[in-house]
């Protein structure tokens, strides 16, 4: 075997042009499974959400889930696909214990949606990713291999299968090969999966959580010398986060470039991405690939979505996330950078709802991106789980009404997040309302001036900065519940400065 | 009394039970006794459920005593082919690979039988996974033909047909993929009907070939078959290929036909099946039957179905292709037989060893045939081409039904043959379904009606009708039955 000298990413891109392609699987959030009435809840006790159909017991038959078909058509429409007027399920035959029937009911040459596209933004530029097909299939069960070092079947002493996931509707979205992205290939891949996730989330048909496997991605990469034909591709599986999508493409470009540079050839194969090492390892070779012996599923009737129904679904599609973001960014008056931060924090919908509940865009963004984002970060929780947009808007209202200072409001928010009640309730319970009673304030100011005659003289003499000591004393006396700005004005007025 | 009970038709038994002249328990016991007395020689049953049957019968008697209105077949015993799941009762499909499996659910048809108050006596023998025409491919030994215990009872549903012919049950459920209800009916002198595909639910029917499998009734009279058809037929939301329409008026048609008047009925004689391919004795009885139909007033016209000659080869691509996929699930992982799980074999080896030990030779042959026909590079030439033939056969039927209300042919080319005479050459065995397969590929209903004897062995007439016109074949069958003496096998 030839020795393979490593190449830097820059060197790799200088010598080769990458072509990428992505196959994404989305678990639909339907209430029941694809072909039976079993529930689809995540995390249930193993083998408790099963029946003769999803266990593939002899004699059982599938009945297609209309909600899943509708969701798939909506995904297809959102990705600008043509919806087939005639579509069929097909059996993909291969033996594996997590597949109860030893075939997967999927779609082959007659998918539900074809020929679409998705525009994604990369470094301020639009890149169009063409969609080849969107089809519907059933998920497999989950296998747990025990006793081996790797968690893979080889070397395991025992394997356990959980069929709860078997039969959950799965939508597969396949892009056409994307050439011409050059050094930005990893970013394009990441941006595509991100955009796809947002599109599907906007449709409300899946929770698209990569960490729970409801969004799964396979990354195809090939390299060719400029001007030459596309090279042999590899398919990388086990890419379980947006960051991994980017890393997997990047590492595969570097690996393939080094192999090609050494005069070797790329083997068409399935590879596995490792989160730990950030590179890909060979899986099974596609050159001895299984013949899946696809044929039309005789247990199901063809799908022929009614044109009027499809038109109705199309008319009811929500605005695309990209256009929606563009509109919000303008309305909120944010820079590209600030908008990106909001997106990265997953705070768009929260801010939007907070504005809808009455807060100004600035205030809404300030709370979610400031205090709450920090807290979510520290505790490793979802931003949306901390509090609701309505509470944030109510909190801001108290500030706007002068009942809370910013500082007090942060304390109140703590109480709200801790579940002590609404902002108004927390404010009342903790006695945090701003001291706006002028009589009480005047007394505190008088006291402060009397206790600090020298400071008072300085202020009278024009040294306004010295007023800080007096303000501090008043704030202390009112336990921070006075508005510092008001106190300052009152002191300066009293001392005639 | 016992002899009378087991020789009575289902309709007669239902009448006795409804009027209180006999209890369902008595009727059931009479049949269980008959099974106990003769089934060691016939071997129609793989499993007899005495306890379940008597409990179901007692339930019917109790409901009757309580004044409940019962269905037209309440209390009547029935045998069920072992390819339909029965909750808690062993279901093997005639295969070692499912030996000992007790399904956790009832097939839709089984549920409908129970709901209608029929009493399930047990599960009947069959060729393994319904692949065969003689029951010689049952993993549990063949069923014997009550007409001659050295001859086959037909297949795959030989157990159901023999049970009915031998008076072990007045009714039975069969399944017909290429002739598995009709051919056993023909060679045992009983009635066997294959309803329109989609007219009877496949939910709980262990699949051989999903696009062809059709459950249907076995009986000794046309009326009984129609009554049973009406109980098991009709839309089932659990089967996507089930037709959402009411059962055609089969019982009414059977009663109308019993008057023996076929005036105005056009009967199409399929030229391609009228003489060629059948043995002389069968052809002779068939010709007499055609004359009988003419005497009943029917107008006989000759029709041509040029693609029927390709039906058998097309069937032997489509059915094994689907079977190769349907039978993949028998891998030793979840239920049934598991071989080699001793810590020294890999998962793949355990699957292979299990399938090697669990499947018989005919099942293996068809799995290999089907796997090949679906393989990449061969699909278009085999499976794809066979599907085109299927379309052409459908067109032949459509054209023929322009000229005739029903089509007729012999049910099977030969009478019951001796054991072992066709197992050496699969093609000779496959020929048994030569005349029955076209209806399966087309999807229309067809029935085998006893119509005479050849050398002392029964011959059947096959009546084929357009899809969802199942009533027509019952009318013709009943008319013929009114003039053909009932075929009674020699005493066992």
Image (cartoon, coloured by chain):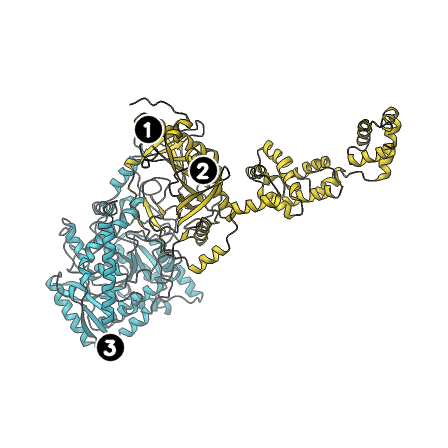
Residue at the spot 22% in from the left edge and 59% down from the top edge: B437
- Along the horizontal axis of the image, is A48 left or right of B268? right
Q: Residue at x 28, y 58 (%)?
A: B174
Q: Which chain hosts label 1?
A: A
Residue A389 lies, in percent from the top left, at: 63, 44
User: How many tags in the picture?
Assistant: 3
Residue B396 against residue A105 in the figure, above or below? below
Q: Are marks 1 and 3 on the same chain?
A: no
Nearer-N-terminus badge (2/1): 2
Q: Nearer the viewer, mark 1 or mark 3?
A: 1
Identify the disc placed on residue A260: 1
Q: Residues within 10 Å of mark 2 (few under 14, many from 20)?
A: many
Tell whether A141 sits left or right of A450: left
Chain in cyan in the render: B
Label 3 element class: loop
Expressed as whole percent of the image width and height from the top left, the position of residue B281 reads: 11, 64
Residue that label 2 marks = A188
User: Chain A hue?
Assistant: yellow
| Residue A66 shown left or right of residue B179 in the figure | right
Residue with the mark numbered 3? B264
Corner quadrant of residue A450: top right
Q: Disc 3 to disc 2, how far (Cα)?
A: 74 Å
């Amino acid at each position: 075997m030839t020795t393979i000298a490593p190449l830097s990413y820059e060197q790799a891109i200088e010598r080769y042009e990458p072509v990428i392609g992505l196959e994404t699987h989305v678990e639909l959030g339907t209430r029941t499974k694809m072909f039976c009435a079993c529930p689809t809840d995540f995390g249930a006790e193993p083998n408790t959400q099963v029946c003769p159909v999803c266990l593939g017991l002899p004699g059982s038959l599938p009945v297609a889930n209309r909600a899943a078909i509708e969701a798939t058509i909506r995904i297809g429409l959102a990705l600008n696909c043509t919806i087939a007027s005639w579509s069929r399920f097909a059996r993909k035959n291969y033996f594996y214990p997590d597949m109860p029937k030893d075939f997967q009911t999927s779609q082959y040459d007659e998918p539900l949606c074809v020929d679409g596209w998705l525009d994604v933004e990369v470094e301020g530029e639009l890149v169009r990713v063409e969609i080849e097909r969107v089809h519907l299939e059933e998920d497999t069960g989950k296998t747990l291999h025990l006793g081996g070092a790797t968690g893979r079947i080889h070397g395991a002493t025992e394997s356990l299968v959980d069929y709860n996931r078997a039969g959950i509707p799965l939508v597969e979205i396949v892009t056409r090969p994307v050439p011409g992205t050059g050094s930005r290939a990893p970013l394009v891949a990441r941006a595509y999966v991100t955009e796809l996730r947002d599109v599907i989330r906007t449709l409300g048909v899946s929770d698209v959580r990569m960490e729970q496997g409801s969004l799964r991605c396979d990354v195809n990469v090939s390299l060719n010398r400029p001007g030459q034909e596309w090279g042999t591709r590899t398919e990388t599986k086990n890419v379980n986060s947006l960051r991994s999508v980017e890393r997997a493409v990047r590492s595969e470009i570097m690996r393939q470039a080094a192999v090609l540079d050494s005069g070797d050839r790329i083997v068409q194969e399935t590879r596995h991405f490792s989160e730990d090492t950030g590179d890909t390892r060979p899986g099974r070779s596609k050159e001895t690939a299984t013949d899946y012996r696809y044929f039309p599923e005789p247990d199901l009737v063809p799908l022929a979505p009614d044109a009027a129904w499809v038109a109705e679904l199309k008319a009811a599609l929500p605005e695309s996330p990209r256009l929606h973001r563009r509109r919000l960014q303008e309305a909120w008056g944010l820079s590209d950078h600030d908008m990106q931060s909001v997106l990265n924090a997953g705070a768009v919908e929260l801010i939007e709802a907070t504005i809808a509940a009455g807060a100004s865009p600035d205030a809404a963004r300030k709370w979610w991106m400031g205090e709450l984002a920090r807290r979510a970060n520290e505790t490793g929780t979802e931003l949306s789980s901390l509090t609701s947009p309505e509470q944030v808007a109510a909190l801001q209202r108290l500030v706007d009404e002068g009942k809370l200072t910013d500082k007090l409001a942060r304390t109140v928010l703590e109480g709200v997040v801790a579940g002590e009640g609404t902002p108004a309730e927390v404010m009342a319970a903790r006695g945090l309302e701003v001291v706006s009673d002028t009589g009480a304030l005047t007394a505190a100011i008088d006291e402060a001036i009397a206790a600090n005659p020298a400071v008072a003289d300085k202020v009278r003499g024009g040294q306004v900065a010295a007023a800080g000591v007096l303000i501090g004393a008043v704030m202390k006396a009112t336990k921070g519940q006075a508005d510092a700005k008001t106190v300052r004005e009152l002191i300066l007025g009293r001392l005639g400065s | 009394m016992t002899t009378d009970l087991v020789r009575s038709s289902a309709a007669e038994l239902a009448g006795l039970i409804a009027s209180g002249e006999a209890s369902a328990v008595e009727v059931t016991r009479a049949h269980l006794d008959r099974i106990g007395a003769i089934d060691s020689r016939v071997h129609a049953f793989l499993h007899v459920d005495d306890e379940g049957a008597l409990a179901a019968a007692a339930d019917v008697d109790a409901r009757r005593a309580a004044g409940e209105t019962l269905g037209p077949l309440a209390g009547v015993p029935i045998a069920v082919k072992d390819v339909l799941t029965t909750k808690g009762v062993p279901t093997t499909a005639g295969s070692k690979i499912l030996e000992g499996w007790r399904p956790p659910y009832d097939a839709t048809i089984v549920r409908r039988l129970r709901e209608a108050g029929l009493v399930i006596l047990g599960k009947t023998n069959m060729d393994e996974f319904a692949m065969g025409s003689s029951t010689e491919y049952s993993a549990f030994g063949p069923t014997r033909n009550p007409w001659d215990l050295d001859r086959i009872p037909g297949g795959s549903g030989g157990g159901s047909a023999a049970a009915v012919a031998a008076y072990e049950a007045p009714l039975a459920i069969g399944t017909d993929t290429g002739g598995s209800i009709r051919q056993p009916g023909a060679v045992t002198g009983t009635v066997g009907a294959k309803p329109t595909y989609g007219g009877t639910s496949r939910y709980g029917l262990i699949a051989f070939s999903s696009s062809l499998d059709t459950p249907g009734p076995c009986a000794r009279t046309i009326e009984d078959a129609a009554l049973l058809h009406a109980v098991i037929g009709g839309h089932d939301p659990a089967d996507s290929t089930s037709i959402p329409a009411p059962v055609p008026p089969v019982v009414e048609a059977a009663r109308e036909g019993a008057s023996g008047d076929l005036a105005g009925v056009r009967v199409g004689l399929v030229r391609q099946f009228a003489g060629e391919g059948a043995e002389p004795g069968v052809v002779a009885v068939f010709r007499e039957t055609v004359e009988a139909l003419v005497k009943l007033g029917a107008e006989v016209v000759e029709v041509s179905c040029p693609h029927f000659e390709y039906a058998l080869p097309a069937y032997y691509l489509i059915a094994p292709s689907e079977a190769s996929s349907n039978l993949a699930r028998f891998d030793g992982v979840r239920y049934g037989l598991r071989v080699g799980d001793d810590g020294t074999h890999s998962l793949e080896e355990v699957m292979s060893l299990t399938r090697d030990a669990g499947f018989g030779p005919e099942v293996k042959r068809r799995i290999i045939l089907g796997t090949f026909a679906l393989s990449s590079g061969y699909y278009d030439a085999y499976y794809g081409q066979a599907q085109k033939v299927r379309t052409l056969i459908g067109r032949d039927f459509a054209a023929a039904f322009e000229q005739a209300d029903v089509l007729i042919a012999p049910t099977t080319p030969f009478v019951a043959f001796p054991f072992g005479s066709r197992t050496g050459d699969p093609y000779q065995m496959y020929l048994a379904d030569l005349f029955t397969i076209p209806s399966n590929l087309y999807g229309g209903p067809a029935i085998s009606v006893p119509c005479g004897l050849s050398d002392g062995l029964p011959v059947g007439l096959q009546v084929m009708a357009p899809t969802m016109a199942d009533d027509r074949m019952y009318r013709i069958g009943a008319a013929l039955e009114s003039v053909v003496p009932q075929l009674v096998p020699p005493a066992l």
